[in-house]
Image: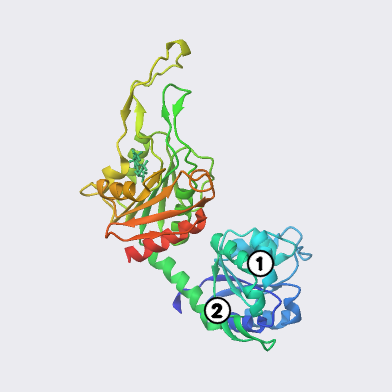
């Protein structure tokens, strides 16, 4: 497990009988070259002692939200920033519920809330709790947030019952984490380009033609690519979204600027064209603000189709070109037409006639049409989760 060497793992141990397994996790992580800092929840201390954790990790154990040793140090921020990854093992039903609602009433939950790191969760609970509708809803939310769930497994429980809910064995947990770092290392060789957001086509210095795109789906794809190790460039039209840490952001306004920035950013291994590029620009853009009496009609001319231009480019075409299709009707026919006419490898199509998905929403429901005639219809999900699913498919394809 050489990918664990030199990694910094923040382990959060919650109060469940499986807490004894976390001691073995610390031992295995350290044996494979990782540094481990640990947070024990109040209830975890009923199952294992801070002394045994310190002895194995060779680090101070953190338990309290307010640090009385060093008042200027905010552990909930510094611990998360220190780590390469956060592992919650065992994660109790209560912990899953708190994370899914963003509660932060102790150090462990506050660290998770304030975290900017990948979070792995190894649940452990009684089978009835695992199968409870409320736990299922919490889990769904956590997966939507982009957290990775390890296990649980089926087996005999400490309470004597049998079923799903046993925490995965320490070796399985460690393997998952090792595979994650291996994937990051492997993907470092890949370059990705994403276009996102609308474009503004100016009529005069203050007026423009645009569309309803928020850019959220493209930003989420760029975030997921970066989190999976890709060298990622995001070319974004005007949006209200924040810059994503680690992603090379190029801001543009018009379709012409987006085209130029795209060509300057190639070659890449994969390009995802999620931007809602205006199909037309204004023919004779005025330098001064036009007086309303003088506006009678606006002449338009076609913008270059950036996706089509790139996917037909002899030398600059990425190995994998992915287009989007926003449709209000005949989703499949229109998407298949775009797939072939724009010469792309996949088209990700969303039905924008529904107001709760697509434009501006945090949710999306798409179908993916592949060049080899296959198609996938994905259920409605958070854009962040969809982005992870798209990126997983990109990784499989590039490998
Ligand atoms: N696209 C592009 N450059 C353009 C127009 C579209 O790169 N000038 C890309 C979009 O980023 C998207 C795909 O083409 O990946 C499809 O965009 P869409 O607006 O759905 O289709 P259009 O080709 O514009 O056709 P129509 O508006 O007629 O549906």
Q: Is residue 200 above or below residue 111?
A: above
Q: Tag 2's secondary structure?
A: helix
Q: Is residue 396 above or below residue 232?
A: below
Q: Nearer the viewer, residue 363 or 258?
A: 363
Q: CA distance from mark 1 to mark 2?
A: 33 Å
Neighbour class for label 1 at 10 Å: few (<14), some, many (≥20)?
Answer: few
Is residue 352 left or right of 371 when viewed as pictured? right
- Residue 29 is marked as 2
Neighbour class for label 2 at 10 Å: few (<14), some, many (≥20)?
Answer: many
Is residue 127 left or right of 256 when viewed as pictured? right
Q: Residue at x 64, y 62 (%)?
A: 100
- Residue 134 is marked as 1
Asked if the beta carbon under badge 2 is closer than 8 A to the nearest atom of ligand 1, the reply is: no
Indicate the position of residue 21 as horizontal and vertical percent values.
62, 83
Indicate the position of residue 396 as horizontal and vertical percent values.
36, 66
Q: Residue at x 26, y 48 (%)?
A: 311
* Location of residue 184 by image quarter: bottom left
Q: Nearer the viewer, residue 6 or 319?
A: 319
Splitting the image into four quadrants, where does ligand 1 fall? top left
């Amino acid at each position: 497990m050489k990918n664990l060497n030199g990694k910094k793992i923040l382990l959060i141990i919650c109060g469940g009988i499986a807490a004894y397994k976390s001691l073995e996790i610390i031992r295995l992580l350290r044996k494979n070259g990782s540094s481990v800092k640990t947070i024990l929840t109040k209830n975890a201390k009923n199952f294992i002692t801070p002394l045994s954790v310190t002895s194995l990790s060779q680090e101070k154990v953190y338990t309290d939200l307010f640090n009385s040793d060093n008042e200027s140090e905010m552990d909930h921020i510094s611990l998360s920033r220190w780590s390469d990854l956060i592992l919650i093992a065992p994660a109790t039903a209560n912990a899953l519920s708190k994370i899914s609602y963003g509660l932060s009433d102790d150090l462990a939950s506050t660290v998770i809330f304030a975290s900017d790191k990948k979070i792995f969760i190894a649940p452990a609970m009684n089978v009835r709790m695992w199968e409870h509708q409320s736990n299922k809803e919490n889990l769904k939310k956590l997966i939507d947030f982009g957290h990775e769930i390890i296990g649980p497994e089926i087996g005999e429980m400490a309470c004597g019952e049998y079923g799903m809910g046993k925490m995965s064995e320490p070796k399985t947990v460690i393997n998952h984490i090792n595979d994650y770092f291996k994937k990051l290392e492997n993907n470092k060789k890949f370059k990705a380009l994403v276009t996102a957001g609308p474009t503004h086509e100016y009529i005069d210095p203050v007026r423009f033609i645009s569309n309803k795109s928020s850019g959220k789906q493209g930003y989420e794809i760029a975030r997921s690519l970066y989190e999976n190790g890709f060298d990622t460039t995001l070319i974004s039209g005007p949006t209200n979204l924040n810059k994503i840490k680690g992603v090379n952001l190029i801001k543009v306004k018009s379709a012409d600027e987006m085209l130029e920035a795209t060509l300057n950013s190639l070659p890449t291994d994969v390009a995802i064209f999620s931007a809602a590029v205006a199909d037309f620009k204004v023919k004779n853009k005025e330098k001064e603000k036009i007086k309303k009496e003088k506006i009678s009609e606006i002449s338009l001319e076609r913008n270059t189709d950036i996706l089509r231009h790139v996917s037909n480019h002899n030398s600059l075409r990425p190995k994998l070109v992915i287009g989007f299709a926003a449709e209000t009707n005949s989703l499949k026919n229109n998407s298949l037409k775009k797939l072939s006419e724009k010469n792309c490898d996949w088209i990700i199509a969303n039905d924008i006639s529904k107001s709760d998905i697509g434009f501006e929403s945090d949710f999306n429901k798409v179908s993916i049409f592949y060049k080899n005639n296959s198609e996938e219809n994905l259920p409605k999900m958070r854009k962040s989760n969809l982005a992870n699913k798209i990126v997983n498919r990109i990784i499989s394809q590039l490998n």
